Amino acid sequence: MMPEALLDLFVLAPVGLVEVDDAGRVSVANLAARRLLTPFTRTGTLDDLFATLADVAPDLAARVRAFDSPRGVVVERLELLAPGQPRGILLSLVKVATGRLVAIASDAADLSVARGLVSRLEQRLNAIEGAVRDYALYTLDAQGTVDSWSAAAERVHQWAAADIIGQPMSALVGPGLSGDGHLHDTLALAARNGWCEEEGHRLRQDGTTFWASTVVTALRDAAGEAIGFSVITHDVSERRKLEEQLREDASSSTDYLTGVSARRAFFEVAQSEVARSRRYGQPLTMLLVDPDHFRERVEQHGESFANEWLRAIAWVCRQESRTTDVVGRVGGEAFAVLLPSTELSGGLVLAERIRERMQRHVFSGDHPGVRCTLSIGVADVTDAITSVEGLLETAGTAVERARQAGMNLVVGYDD
């Protein structure tokens, strides 16, 4: 979604900005663009940029078709004069991704103003990209081929743009993933759900690897079809090293497999929080997170997958929770999240984020095509629920209701 500041800039910019596809169809145009380009139209509507400018720039569509680079300037400061108009406009056409172009139209008399605006925008974009140190930003076409590559991506992956553009994303995937098959599954999930994420190794050009969290987001055309993907890969190697060190150094208060609080430690904290909640009248909510079809999946895919799934659940819960929340493994495959100073409604919101994030998770290793879901029950301290055991029991009742309703659901306990 376009940030509000950028949206204001787009709408109120003194230059005309038009986004079109490679056939010239207009998807969005700001007020300045409609004012500048309307004199060129025959019908008074700006639906097709190439048709609108056919009389004064008949080769515009041909120039776009002949431009074979993944991004760049197709036309720069082309001066056009509408019939009967005393002064013309300057038109630039920039390819920003496969199938996506931006036209910039300015009054020829305001060229210096337009240049200043473009320069400031470029400086802002360069400043943002320069500040991003451990995030790789790039885009793919519909087949998963890299078609744009930022300086930030070059820093993280250490691939030059000239070497990686035109290569499949699988060239960046580390060991343990099934190359093209993993790429196909990831893009299919992102196209279906809008986005997906995963953690796993990524390759640098020299063959070394780093641990990364990657989010793939679908880019859609006007019909809703995925025409490409944006990718953000975050180098989390240092965080992973710290987590591994903490697991190695952890006492019995930490679950050895997932790194979250063990049952006994969780109960000790939960009992203290319940007492505080009752003493001061502060809200306290608990989530019980239970994987769907866990035993069946273990029988089908084996114990190694079970361990990977449990680690993924713990990771998702930690990622979505606040630093003041407590995540614990309270059963063989069950997890609980304790939310101090949180009403039931807030717990439902967090539970829905955890549920949705889990269903988008892409597993690595030998199970890249497996999709897993959660049923989550939510309960809070009330006059009738005054203990940790009571919270777990009522949250468990809500989990059962979620299962009976079809699983992959969040249910709040309600008497």
Image (cartoon, rainbow, N blue to C red):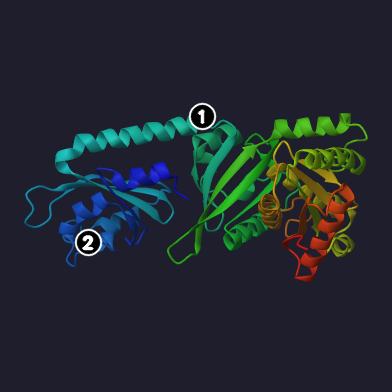
Say which element carries label 2.
helix
Task: Report x, y in % for residue 164.
Answer: 54, 43
Residue sitting nearer the eye, 12 or 101: 12
Residue at the spot 40% in from the left edge and 41% down from the top edge: 5
Q: Mark 2: few, some, or many residues within 10 Å (few <14, many ≥20)?
A: many
Task: Report x, y in % for residue 245.
Answer: 82, 30
Choose mark 2 or mark 1, whichever is in front.
Answer: 1
Asked if labels 1 and 2 touch by Cβ distance under 8 angstroms, the answer is no
Amino acid type for the residue under numbered disc 2 = Thr
Image quadrant occupied by the C terminus: bottom right
Residue at the spot 74% in from the left edge and 53% down from the top edge: 363
Residue at the spot 83% in from the left edge and 53% down from the top edge: 385
Q: Is residue 256 visible?
A: no
Residue 131, numbered circle? 1
* Left or right of 386 on screen, residue 414: left
Task: Report x, y in % for residue 348.
Answer: 69, 54
Residue sitting nearer the eye, 305 or 342: 342
Residue at the spot 26% in from the left edge and 60% down from the top edge: 50
* Left or right of 169 on screen, residue 318: right
Q: Quadrant of residue 111?
A: top left
* Lower position in the chain sequence, tag 2 or tag 1: 2
Above or below — where is 175 with respect to 301? above
Q: CA distance from mark 2 to mark 1?
A: 40 Å
Count every numbered label the image shows and give the total.
2
Say which element carries label 1.
helix
Q: Which residue is mark 2?
A: 52
Amino acid type for the residue under numbered disc 1 = Ala
